[in-house]
Each structure stands twice: as structure tokens, then as C-alpha cells.
């Protein structure tokens, strides 16, 4: 009879295998779904998963799409490791975009080179401020951070609408919602003409490695890892759960806020009523798919970005609806969670004669 | 040799493109970007009907592609660019928020022609077009003024942009022309399409005494919520009579077909140039659905009013028109010019609301 | 004025009903120790399949049943992952929400723009026509009454039946319950399934009664509100109705103030329901004694029988 036995330490092999297995199984499930929809599975899978990587413009778009996912996913993974569930990254993204874009909105003709770093900083602060609310409410009043951070997403969305419809609206815009286009000095520089890869994309690639360094070499990183796997031990070592909640939420919020202002200052180039197609929520999948590990998040963000770009291509060339992409993402997460089991438990055989494995 | 290459290319292309079929160099490929699903029976549905008109009128000479549910912002830019990259020579972007992405892509693909709906910026290869929906609103106002017993109209508005404000004003002008005591109550739902919210708004307006409901949102929910209480309502963007057979009075139908066909034909003939089109009843872009569920004399009056607008004998915004502060904005006997109409961000007197700032 | 008040209360009750269904189900699941964040996904699943069923068969009852069944099946995915495969409940619940949203969008593609015969409010001769109380008590659509009855039954089950007590025991102290011999995992499965069926029913209510339409994401966050309601109600069924009406009321209130022309900016009013939820959450949570008394002690923790 097969039974589960807890492992003493997480199996590293399983930890890296499970995302791959999840992706493969998702592809297989996808093939079945495509068949059921009457589309040729092989071609559809190609368009979804491979085609985006076959051209420079495809790669550039994948990178551009992956950047916010990676940044936010990084921030979330830090929190998730510590058992702090920040579901409101979407709201922190918007808050960061709002505060970070303020200089561009008010100094709309500026050519001052300092405006961009200023915006980045404000973006981080904005995201942090938005994440500070659930942190405060959790540590002071024990309010569940999942619900608080989530409710704040709706509040942030409405605040954005209010601002771009009212005080920040472009006066030359015929009354339509949206700020002026940001001045060139306030836009993230792009590198290759014709492609949308920009400085933010580069930052998003570098940060995971920085984070890896911090997590594995620094005291702070050590604290996070200990707190996540053995909260009681962590407390004995002097790490308060309140501190953990604050630091992880601020880190998560800051990174989400940075992603937000970078998005506004690059591919969008202004603020409009809707600036995120759900990055904050997709980043949750990215964090898990990346096993909460910085480099994993980098890879996972890229993989998810590929499915987005592939999904758009599939709409155009295969008539597949956009909804399939969302479905895929849910399925990936399910498979991943199912295999998660294998990293923490081992399948053993228990004989009926009483001998243990 | 050329034939062999062409054959090989065709074979390759057909293994990648499933529903699009083989690409013929002679067909004009026309692309459409939709903000919502064609099944919404509203805004997007009407555009899709226009697309089908192109197919019907121009048959073998065209091939249309559409991408639905494209969010405004960077995703839109990518999708529009993809259409341009895949050989589409005429691309319709059917939402205001696609303006910046359309312009950006148009710069990269100077040989592709773009048609942007409801926008205000053009380029050598970008045209704009919108319909004079306010003409239909005026007619609706006339009907409402005659039929309402409580003298209270419920107006479900989406976003405080000029188009919507213009609609409210036109409606009230029409109503006042037959019944000076009519009041309009406005609820802003900050969405174009959210059936439960639209239903809520309708219920609240009816609770507050409105006995006719009209909307500037896209679903049939408000109409149906009104029908459930036996309250009259107006359909929006398409004839919604089968959703409320006993209570729909009429609907403004967006007839994009003739314009779309004309533009496609122009590209085929090589006569396409950038233009700004603001057509209404006289050009057949705005059509009223049959007048139903009302006394014969009201229907006759409505038809007569519509006809006088259609022939140009009457303009809905004919002075004297006063704004909410009582100032005369259009003098007696004068007609509001297109500039004032396009940027309309003030209410005329008689609206029971303050414009959100 | 009374007319407006009565009408508003009627509208508030319909706004509250989907929340009552979903929150009741989630309450039972949480009482057994399982935190299922997938309510939004389950509601959407129920909404789309309920709508599809009625479109195809024309039978409202079939639609409601379909909504319940599909919500239940969706919750079982969660159940298998968390109860048998011991995956993290928070992550799995989120996955269910994402999956349910995507699945419903896909299935719903064929149904956008279609409509069905709406389930209408009841009209009892004499009773409904009574002044004031008539409509308030006897004029709602049938599901409003069903939701209240179900809530009452749940309360009675949890408090006054043996199995209810066992379920609560499982949620409070799973190891002890297991030691006594109660089937912890099986009970949790049942609780999760009930939660799924209720969420599905709540979703079906949206697409069959609230508006006879389907639209992607039509729950618009109601699933998350339902989760907050369970905390607001301190895991007591009697409070769920109050919370649901309150929340439904705030949503309607903001629309009412707009229609009344009071001049408060619409987007700020729209924030009210969410801010209120946060405020209420804080108020409830800071009473840590009440939380400890009522919150199931094992909430969110996977159960593995110790040898």
C-alpha cells in the first residue's frame, strides 16, 4: 500500500521538476481542449507556446510583458515564503503608478533628466504606502491581509479613474479620460528602434539576481527563509512576526509600485482609466510557478508572458478566444499545486506485515 | 521557379494559419480590434455587423479578421501591430482608448490605413470617425417627453465624456420641446458593460420615480430590469426589442456598414485619404429602431422629428440653449457648432445632477 | 418617501441574496477548518452553467440545479488538492478563482448576448398587496426566501445537531476529532462540497434572476465580499444576513445618492462598499477574544493524521 511520508527537507529535484511537469501536463490538457473545440492541437500549441519565441519582435514583446510580472512576482514570493498573503499587488501597482506619475503630470513639459529617477522612487513609495495599510491593519488589529489588500485593489482602481477623469485630465483631450502624454524626459528609454524593450525590462531581469543574492547571503534573507518554514523557531530567534509582516508587505508593495510606474512611463506613456490587465493577480501564479525562488520567478514570468503573447497570436491566426489563456493559467497552477505534494512528501510502500519503508 | 516558391510559401502559410485560410496576394485584408465581445448586442455587436457588411458587399475581394476583448493600453498596441504585420492593409480600432496605440503603430506602418472610432487625432494614414448619436437621443427625448407620466427619466451613464454628456443634453432638449416639466436623473456607473451594475442602476432610478429608462451603456440588463417592472425603456446601439418586446420604445442603431464598405472600397480603389467623419441620420449612420409600445400619435411625432433631422431641416442643438448656470450658450435661432458639440462638458439647465469633476 | 424606502429595501434584498448564498456555504467550509478562497471562481462557474442550462432547456429549476452542481464540482477540485494532496489552501483557493474565471469566460462565449425568461418575484393574493409589509415580506423573488431558509437551516444544523457539532469539532481540533474516530477528511470534503454548491447557487442567482444575462466576470468581486462577510459575521450564520444586507445596501445607497442628484462624485461613492468592508473587518478583528472564540482553530491548516 502506498502512503505519504513527510520528507525531512524539501526535495530539490522535485522542486524544479514540478513546474516543468505542470507545464507539460497543461500543454497536454490544452491539446485536449483544442480538440474539443475543433482546432488542430499541434498548431494551436505551437502558436501558444513556441511562436512568440521565434522572432525578435516576439521576444521583445515577451520581455516587455514579462517585466511587470517578474517584478511583482518577486515581491509576492518574498511575502508568500513568510506566510504573508499579499493579494492586493494589483492595487499597489496602481498606487505606485499614480504617485510615480505625478511629476510627469504636473511638470508635463519638463526636460529635466532627474524627473525619471524621481518618478521611479515615488513609484516605489506609492506601492509601499498602499501595502502599508494591510500591514498596519494586520499588526495592529489582526485584520486579515488577504481581504484588506484585495479591497484596496478596488479602491485604487476607482482612485485612478477619478484622477484621470478629473484633476489630472488632459485639458486638450476633449474631455476624454486620461492624462497628457508624458514628456520624453519622463519616459523610460528604449534601446532598439522598432522594439519596445526598455530600461524597465532590463531592471526586471536584473532584480531577481539581486534578490537571490540578498535572500541567500544576507541576514534579512535568512530571516525570511526561516520565518517561512519555521515560524516558531523564528520567533525564538528574535524575529517578530510583526516585523515580518511589515517588511514583506513593504517589499511586495514597493516592487509592485515600481512595476506600475515603469509601465506608465514606458509602453503606455500616460495614465488612463485602466493601466493593468491584471498583472497583480497573474503575478501570484508567477510567484508559485517560480517556486517562490527569484530565478524561478524570472523563468516563470517569462513562461506566463509567452502564453499571453501566444494567446493574442492565437486569436488572430487561429480564432481561439482570449479566455483560453486565463484557463491555461488556472490549469498550470492546479497541476503545480498537485505536484507540490511531491516536494514535501515521499511516496513509500508500507507492507501489511508491519515493516516501515 | 516563382510558381514553386509561391506554392511552397502557400503550403507553409497554410500549416500555420488555421481559420484564416490561405493568403491570397489579391485580397484586401481588413482587421478589426474590439473592446468587447461581438455578442454584447451593443457597441461591439454593431461594429461586427459593419464588418459583416464588408464581407457581404465586397465578397471575394476582402478577408476580414477580428480580435475581441482587447484591453486598451500596451496590449492594444501589440495586437494592432500584429494585424499590421500580418498583411492587413485596413485596420479599424473601435474604442476611444485605442487612440495612442493606433497612432504609434501607424507611424511604424505608413502603408497601412487605420480608422479610429470616436478619437480626435489623425495622421496621414489615420482617420477618425464617429456617429451623431445625439440626433437619436433628441428623438428619444421627444418620445419620453410625451409618454412619461411621472415626468422623471432615468439615465444610466457610463463615463462623463463629451459623447455621453452630449447625449444627455440632446435627450433633455428633445424632451423639453414637448414637455418643459421633464426632469432627468443621472447615475454614473463608470463602466460600458456590467450587466448587474446596470440592472442595479435601473432599479434605483425606478425606485426614485423614473418611469422611462435610457442608457449609455452596452448591455440589455437595464432594459430588462425595466421590463420586469413593466417600465418603458430605450435600447442602445442595436435593436434590443426581443429582450423587451413589450416595453422597448425604440433604440438608436449604429449603422457602421455603409461607412465601412465605403472605406474598404476606397482602399481597393487607391483613393483612401485621412479624413474625419461625423455622420448622422442624413448619411444613414444613425438609424432609429421601429417605434413600438407607444400611442400612434407619439410614433408619428417621433418619425417626423427624425425625418426633419435627417433632411437637415432641424438641428437638435438649436438655440436658445442655456447651461446649468443659466447663461445662454447658444443664441436664439443659432445652431451649436461641431466644435462645441465635440468638446461638450457642461450640462444644459434641467439636468438633476452635477457633472463629476 | 416610504415608497422609496420600501423600494430600496426590496432592491437591497436582491443585492444581498447572492452574498447570503455564497457566505453561508463558505461559513460551513470554514467551520470545518477549510479556507476556500475560490468563492469567486465557483460563483462564476455556477453562473455560466446555470445560464447555459436554462438557455438550452428553458427550465429555471434546471438552471439553478446546474449552477449548484457545477459549483460543487469546482469545489471538489479544490478539495482533492487540499484535503487529499495536502496542498496549500490559500494558493489552491486562488488557483480555483483564476481557473473558474477563465473557464466561465470560455464556456460563456456562446452565451453572451443571449437572454432567458427571468425568474420573477412572487405575488401572493392578498398578502403581497398589504400596505408596506405586503411587498417587504411577500413580494420578493423565490430565491430570496430560499437563501434565508438555507441560512436558518445551516444555523440549526451547526448548533443543534450532532453532525453539526462534529463538524465544528473537526474545525476546532482536528487531531482530537480524529482520535475520537470521526472521519475528519470526509467531513471536510462534505463541507467544501456544500460550500461549492452554495457558491454556485449564488452565482446562478446572478445570471438567472438578477439579470437574465451572462457576462464575463459578472460577479465583480462578490465572492471576495462573501469571504469578508464570513469574518464579519464571526462565523455565525445569524450575522451573515445582516452583513449581506448591509453590504448590498451600501452598493445600492451609492447609486441612490447619485440618482438623487446629491452631487457627491460617483467614483468616491463607488469606493464605499470596499472601504466599508475594510473598516468592518478591522472592527471585528480587533476584538481578538471574539475571533478566538468563534474562528475555527484549525482554519487553513492541512490535516494529516498523526500516528
Image (tube, rainbow, N blue to C red):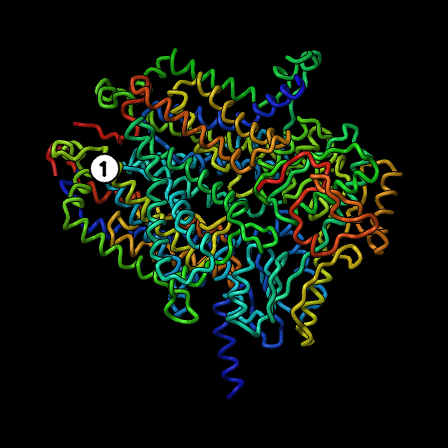
Q: Residues within 10 Å of mark 1 (few under 14, many from 20)?
A: many
Q: Look at the picture and state if A73 lies above or below B110.
A: above
* Location of residue A24 in the rendering, given as x and y in whole percent from the top left corner: 33, 55
* Location of residue B238 in the rendering, given as x and y in whole percent from the top left corner: 70, 48
Q: Disc 1 is attached to a residue of which chain?
A: A
Q: Residue at x 18, y 53 (%)?
A: A213
| Screen quadrant of the C terminus of chain B | top right
Judge by depth and name the residue closer to the eye, C229 or A121. A121
Left or right, C207 with respect to C170, comes to right
Count the marks: how many?
1
Q: Residue at x 58, y 71 (%)?
A: B112
Left or right, C222 with respect to C8, comes to left
Is residue A103 visible to us here? Answer: yes
Q: Look at the picture and state if A222 lies above or below B64.
A: above
Residue C234 in which image quadrant: top left
Residue B260 in which image quadrant: bottom right
Left or right, C169 with respect to A272, comes to left
Furthest residue in direction front, as rendered: B327
Is residue A31 visible to us here? Answer: no
Left or right, B355 with respect to A355, comes to right
* Location of residue C275 in the rendering, given as x and y in whole percent from the top left corner: 44, 31
* Location of residue B296 in the rendering, given as x and y in whole percent from the top left corner: 88, 38
The residue where tag 1 is placed is A244
Furthest residue in direction bottom, as rendered: B1
Judge by depth and name the residue closer to the eye, B87 or A120. A120
Furthest residue in direction left, as rendered: A355
Q: Secondary structure at mark 1?
A: helix
Q: Look at the picture and state if A105 lies above or below A195.
A: above
Amino acid at each position: 500500500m502506498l502512503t505519504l511520508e513527510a520528507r525531512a527537507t524539501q526535495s530539490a529535484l522535485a522542486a524544479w521538476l514540478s513546474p516543468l511537469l505542470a507545464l507539460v501536463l497543461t500543454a497536454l490538457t490544452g491539446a485536449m481542449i483544442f480538440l474539443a473545440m475543433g482546432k488542430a492541437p499541434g498548431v494551436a500549441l505551437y502558436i501558444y507556446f513556441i511562436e512568440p519565441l521565434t522572432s525578435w519582435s516576439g521576444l521583445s514583446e515577451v520581455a516587455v510583458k514579462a517585466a511587470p510580472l517578474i517584478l511583482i512576482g518577486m515581491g509576492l514570493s518574498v511575502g508568500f515564503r513568510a506566510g504573508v498573503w499579499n493579494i492586493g499587488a494589483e492595487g499597489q501597482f496602481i498606487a505606485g503608478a499614480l504617485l510615480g506619475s505625478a511629476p510627469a503630470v504636473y511638470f508635463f513639459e519638463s526636460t529635466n533628466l532627474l524627473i525619471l529617477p524621481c518618478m521611479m522612487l515615488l513609484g516605489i513609495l506609492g506601492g509601499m504606502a498602499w501595502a502599508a495599510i494591510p500591514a498596519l491593519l494586520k499588526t495592529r488589529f489582526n485584520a486579515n491581509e488577504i481581504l484588506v489588500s484585495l479591497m484596496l485593489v478596488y479602491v485604487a482602481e476607482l482612485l485612478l479613474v477619478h484622477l484621470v477623469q478629473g484633476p489630472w485630465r488632459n485639458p486638450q483631450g476633449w474631455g476624454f479620460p486620461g492624462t497628457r502624454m508624458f514628456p520624453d524626459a519622463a519616459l523610460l528609454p528604449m534601446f532598439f528602434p522598432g522594439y519596445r524593450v526598455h530600461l524597465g525590462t532590463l531592471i526586471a531581469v536584473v532584480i531577481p539576481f539581486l534578490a537571490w543574492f540578498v535572500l541567500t547571503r544576507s541576514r534579512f534573507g535568512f530571516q525570511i527563509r526561516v520565518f517561512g518554514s519555521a515560524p516558531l523557531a523564528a520567533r525564538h530567534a528574535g524575529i517578530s512576526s510583526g516585523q515580518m509582516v511589515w517588511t514583506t508587505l513593504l517589499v511586495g508593495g514597493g516592487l509592485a509600485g515600481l512595476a506600475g510606474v515603469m509601465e506608465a512611463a514606458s509602453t503606455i506613456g500616460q495614465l488612463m482609466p485602466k493601466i493593468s490587465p491584471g498583472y497583480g493577480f497573474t503575478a501570484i501564479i508567477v510567484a508559485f510557478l517560480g517556486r517562490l525562488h527569484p530565478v524561478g520567478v524570472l523563468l516563470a514570468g517569462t513562461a506566463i508572458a509567452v502564453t499571453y503573447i501566444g494567446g493574442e497570436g492565437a486569436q488572430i491566426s487561429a480564432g481561439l478566444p482570449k479566455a483560453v489563456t486565463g484557463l491555461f493559467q488556472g490549469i498550470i497552477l492546479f497541476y503545480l499545486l498537485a505536484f507540490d505534494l511531491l516536494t514535501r512528501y515521499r511516496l513509500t510502500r508500507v507492507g501489511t506485515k508491519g515493516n516501515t519503508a | 521557379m516563382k510558381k514553386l516558391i509561391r506554392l511552397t510559401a502557400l503550403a507553409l502559410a497554410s500549416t500555420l494559419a488555421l481559420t484564416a485560410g490561405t493568403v491570397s496576394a489579391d485580397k484586401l485584408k481588413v482587421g478589426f480590434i474590439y473592446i468587447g465581445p461581438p455578442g454584447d448586442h451593443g457597441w461591439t455587436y454593431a461594429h461586427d455587423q459593419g464588418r459583416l457588411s464588408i464581407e457581404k458587399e465586397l465578397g471575394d475581394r476582402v478577408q476580414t479578421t477580428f480580435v475581441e476583448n482587447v484591453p486598451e493600453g500596451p496590449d492594444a498596441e501589440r495586437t494592432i501591430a500584429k494585424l499590421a504585420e500580418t498583411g492587413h492593409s485596413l485596420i479599424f480600432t473601435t474604442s476611444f482608448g485605442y487612440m495612442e496605440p493606433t497612432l504609434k503603430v501607424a507611424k511604424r506602418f505608413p502603408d497601412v490605413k487605420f480608422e479610429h472610432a470616436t478619437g480626435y487625432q489623425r495622421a496621414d494614414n489615420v482617420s477618425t470617425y464617429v456617429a451623431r448619436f445625439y440626433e437619436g437621443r433628441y428623438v428619444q427625448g421627444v418620445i419620453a417627453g410625451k409618454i412619461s407620466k411621472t415626468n422623471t427619466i432615468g439615465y444610466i451613464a457610463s463615463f462623463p465624456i463629451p459623447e455621453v454628456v452630449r447625449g444627455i443634453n440632446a435627450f433633455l432638449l428633445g424632451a423639453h420641446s414637448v414637455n418643459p416639466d421633464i426632469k432627468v436623473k443621472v447615475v454614473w456607473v463608470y463602466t460600458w458593460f456590467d450587466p448587474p451594475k446596470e440592472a442595479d442602476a435601473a432599479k434605483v432610478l425606478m425606485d426614485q420615480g423614473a418611469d422611462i429608462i435610457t442608457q449609455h451603456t452596452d448591455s440589455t440588463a437595464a432594459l430588462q430590469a425595466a421590463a420586469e417592472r413593466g417600465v418603458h425603456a430605450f435600447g442602445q446601439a442595436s435593436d434590443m426589442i426581443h429582450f423587451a418586446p413589450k416595453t422597448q420604445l425604440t433604440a438608436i442603431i449604429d449603422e457602421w456598414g455603409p461607412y465601412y464598405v465605403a472605406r474598404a472600397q476606397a482602399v481597393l480603389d487607391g483613393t483612401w485619404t485621412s479624413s474625419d467623419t461625423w455622420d448622422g441620420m442624413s448619411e444613414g449612420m444613425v438609424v432609429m429602431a421601429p417605434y413600438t409600445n407607444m400611442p400612434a400619435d407619439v410614433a408619428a411625432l417621433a418619425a417626423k422629428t427624425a425625418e426633419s433631422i435627417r433632411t437637415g431641416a432641424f438641428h437638435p442643438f438649436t438655440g436658445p440653449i442655456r447651461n446649468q448656470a443659466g447663461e445662454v450658450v447658444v443664441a436664439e435661432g443659432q445652431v451649436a457648432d461641431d466644435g462645441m458639440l465635440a468638446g461638450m462638458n457642461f450640462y444644459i439647465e434641467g439636468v438633476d445632477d452635477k457633472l463629476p469633476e | 418617501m416610504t415608497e422609496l424606502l420600501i423600494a430600496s429595501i426590496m432592491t437591497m434584498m436582491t443585492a444581498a441574496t447572492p452574498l447570503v448564498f455564497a457566505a453561508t456555504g463558505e461559513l460551513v467550509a470554514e467551520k470545518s477548518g477549510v479556507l476556500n478562497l475560490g468563492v469567486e471562481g465557483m460563483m462564476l462557474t455556477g453562473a455560466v452553467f446555470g445560464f447555459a442550462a436554462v438557455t438550452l432547456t428553458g427550465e429555471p429549476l434546471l438552471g439553478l440545479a446546474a449552477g449548484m452542481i457545477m459549483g460543487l464540482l469546482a469545489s471538489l477540485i479544490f478539495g482533492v488538492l487540499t484535503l487529499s494532496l495536502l496542498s496549500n489552501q490559500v494558493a489552491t483557493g486562488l488557483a480555483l478563482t483564476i481557473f473558474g474565471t477563465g473557464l466561465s469566460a470560455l464556456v460563456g462565449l456562446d452565451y453572451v448576448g443571449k437572454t432567458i425568461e427571468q425568474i420573477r418575484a412572487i405575488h401572493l393574493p392578498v398578502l403581497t398587496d398589504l400596505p408596506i409589509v405586503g411587498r417587504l415580506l411577500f413580494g420578493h423573488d423565490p430565491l430570496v426566501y430560499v437563501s434565508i431558509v438555507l441560512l436558518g437551516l445551516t444555523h440549526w444544523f451547526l448548533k443543534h445537531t450532532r453532525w453539526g457539532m462534529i463538524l465544528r469539532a473537526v474545525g476546532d481540533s482536528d487531531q482530537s476529532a480524529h482520535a475520537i474516530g470521526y472521519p475528519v477528511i470526509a467531513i471536510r470534503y462534505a463541507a467544501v462540497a456544500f460550500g461549492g454548491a452554495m457558491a454556485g447557487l449564488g452565482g446562478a442567482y446572478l445570471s438567472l434572476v438578477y439579470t437574465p444575462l451572462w457576462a464575463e466576470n459578472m460577479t465583480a468581486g462578490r465572492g471576495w465580499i462573501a469571504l469578508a462577510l464570513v469574518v464579519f459575521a464571526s462565523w455565525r450564520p445569524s450575522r451573515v444576513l445582516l452583513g449581506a444586507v448591509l453590504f448590498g445596501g451600501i452598493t445600492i445607497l451609492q447609486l441612490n445618492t447619485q440618482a438623487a442628484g446629491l452631487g457627491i462624485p460617483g467614483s468616491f461613492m463607488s469606493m464605499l462598499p470596499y472601504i466599508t468592508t475594510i473598516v468592518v473587518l478591522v472592527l471585528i478583528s480587533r476584538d481578538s477574544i471574539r475571533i478566538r472564540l468563534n474562528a475555527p482553530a484549525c482554519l487553513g491548516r492541512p490535516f494529516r493524521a498523526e500516528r
